[in-house]
Amino acid sequence: MPDPIEITAARPRVRGELLGAGAAALLVLAAFTVPQIASESWRERLFAGAAPIFGWWSPHIGWGTVPAVALAAAVVARGPAVARRLGWRALLAAGYVTALAWAFALALVDGWERGFTARLADGHEYLAEVPGVSDIPLMLDTFTDRILDGQPDSWTTHVSGHPPGALLFFTLLDRLGLGGPTWAGIVCVVIGCSAPIAVAVALRALGSEDRARTALPFLVLAPAAIWIAVSADAVFAGVTAWAVALLALATRAGPVVPTAGAAGMLFGFGIYLNYGLVLMGFVAVAVLVAGRTARPLLPAVLGALLVVAAFTVAGFWWFDGYHLVVERYYQGIATERPYGYWWWGNLAATVCVVGLATAAALPRALTRLRVREPAALLVAGALCAIAAADISGLSKAETERIWLPFDMWLLAATAYLPYARARPWLAVQAAGALVLVHLLFTNW
């Protein structure tokens, strides 16, 4: 017979989960409802047909519907038990394969072309500029000259809005014989789906294997997979997730310098993929606090500076690019999009990405900050990054993909959901993703 004291203690935790999920659900409902009841002229200024998600309403089913539902049912039914029982390496392998299958299934709900290849083939995307890059050193040296709009040779929207690392990445893929939207999409998914595994690796390295095992099914089944398949931001999420994981590994006894140096190089490359990824510094600090050591700091900084030096010598100065991008940002629709809606609409989009299970777990995760639990600290780092990005006003809309690198660490909050309630919350997580992918088409 259950202990009455344990039952009484569990009630506040259940209430906290329901309050967290309920508040997040109301935020999402308001964010979807307000544009529908507002004036047409105001709604048009949002430049998002399904605000707060960048997409448009179009209920549909597709080839991926049955596989996605079947996979979700399997993970809900067996995921928590398998995560407890499997050996560590087998668990990571199973988690990665499941994440890949989930992402591909969700993409195929929209069909192969619309849901997969067409997204990266858009004229505003990186691939549009790849054929024109005949000389990589020249591209890097003259990159800032083409950031501002209104010039005959201005970069397309996405290229101009990011440092040259993103264009360099897709150009190198093309040089390796992996050109075109299909290969680009596959690579984005392959790298992006490794991010949940990196989160689990980081948690275990920081001494929280049990938390990692609890969170992994939620990480794998997160609605974030809708935007991992397919957007370039999936690559950004994967790169920075492994930067954090390597930094976490460097806090353990062992070869600190090479591991921390590699982490620093990935962090360094991250800020040349997306200017906003400098905010991953919050998560990096959380790792060092959780690891209770500063030993990896110096080699990590040196590793990052090597990347900075390489791009600077090649002719691209990060700060020049950043200031020009801010100017370019306000040359476009950013001047029209109302900050009064998007500062909280962005947060609603984030809930759509991480799922209500994350919102349910968040209150308990934050209470564990006082004892400096690793998972709680990583969640706090992600929250700081999201808050800073939101307050900046440089992320009005499309944050469901832009904030993927931060969202991966916010999902770590699910490590605080008890095993007894894991399956119901996993079902809520999967249902959210399935509802979104079947009710609307996303631009990314």
Image (cartoon, rainbow, N blue to C red):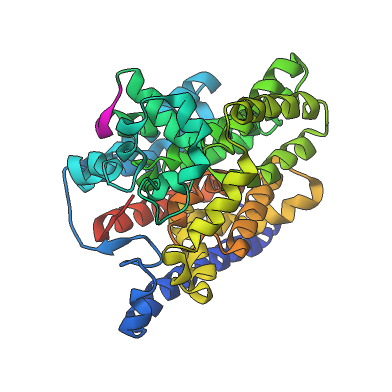
For this orientation, the residue located farthest to the front is: 152
- Which residue does the image show at 24% across and 45% down from the upper left? 115
227 sits left or right of 256 in the view: left
What is the x, y in percent for residue 429? Answer: 42, 52
Residue toward you, 277 or 16: 277
Q: In this rendering, does residue 102 appear at all?
A: no
Residue toward you, 347 or 428: 347
What is the x, y in percent for residue 311? Answer: 59, 29
In the displayed structure, 88 sits above or below 292; it is above
- Which residue does the image show at 31% across and 82% down from the upper left? 40
Residue toward you, 43 or 111: 43
Q: Is the stretch drawn in magenta largely helix, strand or loop?
A: helix
Residue 26 sits inside the magenta stretch: no
352 sits left or right of 313 in the view: left
For this orientation, the residue located farthest to the top is: 255
In the displayed structure, 93 sits above or below 101; it is above
Q: What stretch is highlighted in magenta?
A: 178-182
Residue toward you, 307 or 146: 146
374 sits left or right of 107 in the view: right
- Which residue does the image show at 74% across and 29% down from the upper left? 301
Residue 270 position by quadrant: top right
- Which residue does the image show at 21% across and 42% down from the upper left? 64
What is the x, y in percent for residue 94? Answer: 42, 26
